[in-house]
Amino acid sequence: MEKNIYAYKCKRCGHLHYPYRTICKNCGQNDHNEFEIVPLAKKGKLLTFTHLYTLPADYETVKLTLGIVELDDGMRITGQLKMDEPKIGMKVKGEVEVVRQDEYNKYLGMVFYKI
Amino acid sequence: MRDVYVVGIGITSFTRLEYPLVEIAAYPGLMALRDSGLDKVDHLYVANMGGGRINTQTGLASALVDHLSLTPAGAETIENGPASGASAIKQGFIAVASGMHDVVMVIGAERMREVNNLEATDFVATLTHPHAEYIYGVTLPSLAGMFTRLYMEKYGVTSRHLGMVAVKNHANAMDNFYAHLHQPITLEGILDSPEAATNNPMVADPLRFFDCCPVSDGGSCVILATGDILKKLNKPMIRLAGIGQATDTHAIHERQEPTDLLAVREAARKSFEMAGVKPKDVDVAELHDAFTILEIVESEEVGFFKKGEGHIALEKGLTKRGGKIPINPSGGLKARGHPVGATGVAQAHEIVLQLRGEAEKRQVKNAKIGFTCNFGGFGNNVVCLTFIKEK
């Protein structure tokens, strides 16, 4: 099965959220908290990025490139970038991969590549 | 509501301190008691973020109230990320204004240098969204880096502007005995010289080493009390006149306009409205420059300058001591240092010194109205305070 990252669609008003929240940001009503999970789009354009050189202890690389991507479905996601020269506005495609690993766990998240 | 005044203040040096967290918290408390002339308080609020995680010390308020021999006064620890300090002051204000207590001690303290820089950065990164940000290796510097890149693209801010904030705040800290960094810097040294690449490496591109605050230990204290008590103590009339707080989305990517800091805008608006003053009335301000870009953007969002024009005001020298609105005369987080729980209280400490006219070489002349902005998370929880000198 293809791995995905999911958005949460309010079953009342259809508003999409990523990440998950308990009360819909759009309806904001306390009598309803049901969401349907919908896979996020994987293509989009790069909104901003940074090359980070002081990494958290779990990483053994010299630098980590992080960015925010505006996906084709209008949702935004923070993820890792694997490309040499990222540019604001460039088209990117995401894959779900291991983004962090500690002694006990592997964490899956979105990694973006140049199209 | 009753009026609330600051009757005592105290602070430690912000640096690496080789003594336990509870003593880092206690020392400014002792200084503030001496400053006020009081021996007892009705209640203690302690702002701290990392005691449990970094110093294996939970229940800090209970330990501290006994350490200061203030028992049986009530005591609570307030954790609100890097805005813990101003949040604790807000709780103190509510307690005095409501009539529940007459004298409240507010202490902010942090001991972050007990662990190495990587662990300290990772500890602060636990503020970020656990599965939409943290798992990717997102840290506060990386959020600030992505924010800065957008701000540069949209408003024409350059690395030189960021450097100017660092140069100004390092210069201010030279006159602050309690500041972490007593190191004058120049734009040439950090950007232009051949050594700049090694002196000032990239941390979170486009943010460099000198765009980021140091990791500090330190504590600070303010004692809040009613007007009647202030008169008995015969202290300068510094009133805590306005408090505003606002929040924003936890994950940064959910913000509609990612270059806006709406919580700063709203918290400042509420604080000014409660105090009955306008941004243009402010004589001196302490803004939360954990990263140089934040001083520029906050100076716009709180209303000192128009959106997108903060860097131009900086260029003109309007935010220097002696300028139209001096920002961070203490050196700010950039050079005074940033022991996270202590920062909001240290900002208030500086404003009280300035309004009392006791800031010595860094005194802003005739300062009557002072303002602080304490920025939690990456702008998801912001507390702004307005102080007015009444006599």
Image (cartoon, helix red, strand yellow):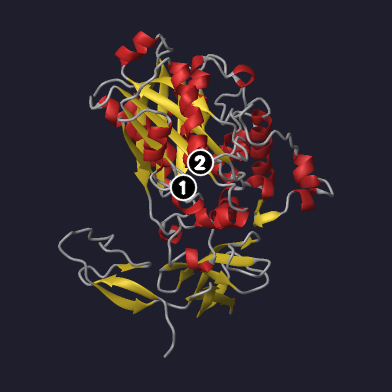
Determine the CA span between mark 1 and mark 2: 8 Å
Decide if residue B303 is in sight here: no
Return the residue at label 2: B21
Left or right relative to B177: residue A108:
left
Judged from the image, the secondary structure of the residue bearing numbered disc 2 is helix
Which image quadrant is residue B77 in? top left
Residue farthest along the right direction in this orientation: B194
**10 Å neighbourhood of mark 1: few (<14), some, or many (≥20)?**
many
Count of picture labels: 2
Q: Quadrant of the N terminus of chain A?
A: bottom left
Which image quadrant is residue A111 in? bottom right
Q: Are marks 1 and 2 in contact (CB under 8 Å)?
A: yes
Residue B152 position, x and y percent, is 60, 51
Q: Quadrant of the C terminus of chain A?
A: bottom right
Residue A109 position, x and y percent, is 48, 74
The tag on residue B24 is none
Sequence-first tag of 1 and 2: 2
Q: Residue at x 35, y 9 (%)?
A: B231
Which image quadrant is residue A72 in? bottom left
Q: Which amino acid, mark 1?
A: Gly
Same chain under badges 1 and 2? The reply is yes
Q: Residue at x 42, y 9 (%)?
A: B391
What chain does mark 2 sit on? Answer: B
What chain does mark 1 sit on? Answer: B
Residue farthest along the bottom direction in this orientation: A1
Residue B303 position, x and y percent, is 45, 34
Q: Which amino acid, mark 2?
A: Leu
Left or right relative to B188: residue B117:
left
The tag on residue B51 is 1
Q: Nearer the viewer, residue B26 or B180?
A: B26
